[in-house]
Image: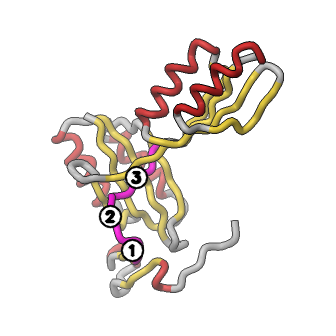
Amino acid sequence: MRHVISALVINEPGVLANVAGMFAARGFNIDSLVVGRTDNPELSRMTLVVNADDATLEQVRKQLAKLVPVAKVKDYTGTAYIERDLALICVGVGPEKRSEVLEIVNLFRGRVVDVARESLVIEIAGTEGKIEAMIELLKPYGIKELHRTGVIAMARGMQSGREELPERASGGKRKRSLGAASGAALPPS
């Protein structure tokens, strides 16, 4: 069964290797892994997709929560959540079939981000299922290259606001609120 897990982690070198090493050491397979900054520069969010039974999933959650740089683990199983994946797809298609490909792109609310004489680069965002369906329809036209970001997820109705950094993750300091309300700013991109 497919499960989406979010882990709020301390933003420091080696955290990704630590998490990946834990998965490898226990024989857990990661189907998708995305890491990105949060509104607080001290924290990053990892979104993992794993195909596992309930017992394996429970072990994944427990082992993740034990890692020192992991501040919080959320399993989206059984909750309403929004997920998005992003794909860039280069389709080898000349002018004679381009209108057919554009019709598929429009149907999936994708967009063309590059046009060449014999190819189109298409951008699409949505659920994994939506992206897989579009890929299947584009295969007959010849997919030359495909890049995907992996899944990010957020609970529906979630209040944006404070992320808590637990005492054990903050070097024994008292628990403090972080996030937009704390006035923390991201460095310029």
Q: CA distance from mark 2 to mark 3?
A: 12 Å
Q: Is residue 94 above or below residue 13?
A: above
- Residue most toward the left? 55
Total marks placed: 3
Magenta range: 151-161
Secondary-structure class at tag 3: strand
Q: Position of residue 62 (x, y in %)?
A: 23, 54
Task: Inspect the image, locate mark 2, and give the three-letter code of the amino acid beneath it.
Answer: Gly
Q: CA distance from mark 2 to mark 1?
A: 16 Å
Task: Inspect the image, locate mark 1, and give the three-letter code of the amino acid beneath it.
Answer: Glu
Q: Position of residue 122 (x, y in %)?
A: 65, 33
Residue identified by numbered label 3: 153
Q: Position of residue 132 (x, y in %)?
A: 46, 28
Q: Earlier in the sequence, mark 3 or mark 1?
A: 3
Residue identified by numbered label 2: 157
Label annotation for residue 163: 1
Placement of the N terminus among the 4 image quadrants: top left
Label 2 with label 3: CB-CB less than 8 Å: no
Q: Nearer the viewer, residue 118 or 26?
A: 118
Task: Inspect the image, locate mark 3, and give the three-letter code of the amino acid beneath it.
Answer: Ala
- Residue pictured at 48% horizontal, 53% vertical: 16
Locate residue 176 relative to residue 186 in the image: left or right: left
Q: Nearer the viewer, residue 83 or 108?
A: 108
Q: Is residue 68 above or below residue 187?
A: above
Q: Could you tell me what secondary structure mostly forms the magenta stretch?
A: loop
